[in-house]
Image (spheres, rainbow, N blue to C red):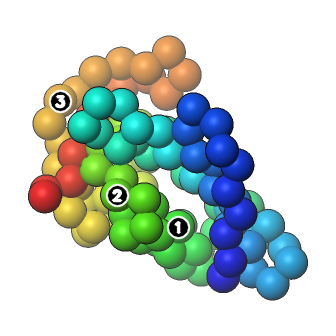
Amino acid sequence: MRTEEKEQSYKAVTFYEGDEPIGYADIEVIDDEIWLNHLAVREDYRGKGYGQKILLTAIKKYGVNTLTCAVKNAVAFHIYKKYGFDVVEVGNSFDDGEVFLMKRKQ
């Protein structure tokens, strides 16, 4: 799997399997936190471990340590917990409803 980056106020990282784009992650540095703002996997590639691969790359290569997860998204929540993220706060998002603020153990 290869990646392609665009330099902006954040990193937009696209993930490929061969020449096929399969997902992306938006990563942003805010003070001492490195946020995973979005993580998405193309529908026809879901359920094959690509989301976890993208998350691991975001953690290892980019140092992601903070994210939010919609309370209703149990699948993502369990994956984030598996890779060391803990809930530190519960809040609301205008687009996702109730969300968990999660930080990774350092």
Locate residue 90 relative to residue 99 in the image: left or right: left
> In the image, what residue occupies the spot 22% across and 27% down?
90
Left or right: 10 with respect to 74?
right
Q: Quadrant of the N terminus?
A: bottom right
Q: Is residue 15 above or below residue 93?
A: below
Q: Residue at x 64, y 37 (%)?
A: 8
Q: What element carries label 2?
A: loop
**Of pointers 2 and 3, the one earlier in the residue sequence:** 2
Residue 22, placed above or below residue 67: below
Please provide percent x and percent y for residue 75. 42, 58
> Which mark is on residue 89?
3
**Dot 2 alpha-carbon crowd within 10 angstroms: few under 14, some 14 to 19, many 20 or more:** some
Q: Residue at x 71, y 63 (%)?
A: 4
Q: Distance between the residues labelled 2 and 3?
A: 21 Å
What residue is pinned by disc 2?
63
Amino acid type, mark 3 = Glu
Would you name the residue on which mark 1 appears? 54
**Mark 2–mark 3 CB contact (< 8 Å):** no
Farthest residue toward the right?
19
Vertical side of 32 occupied by 3: above or below: below
What residue type is disc 1 on? Ile
Q: Is residue 5 above or below residue 31?
A: below
Foreground label between 2 and 3: 2
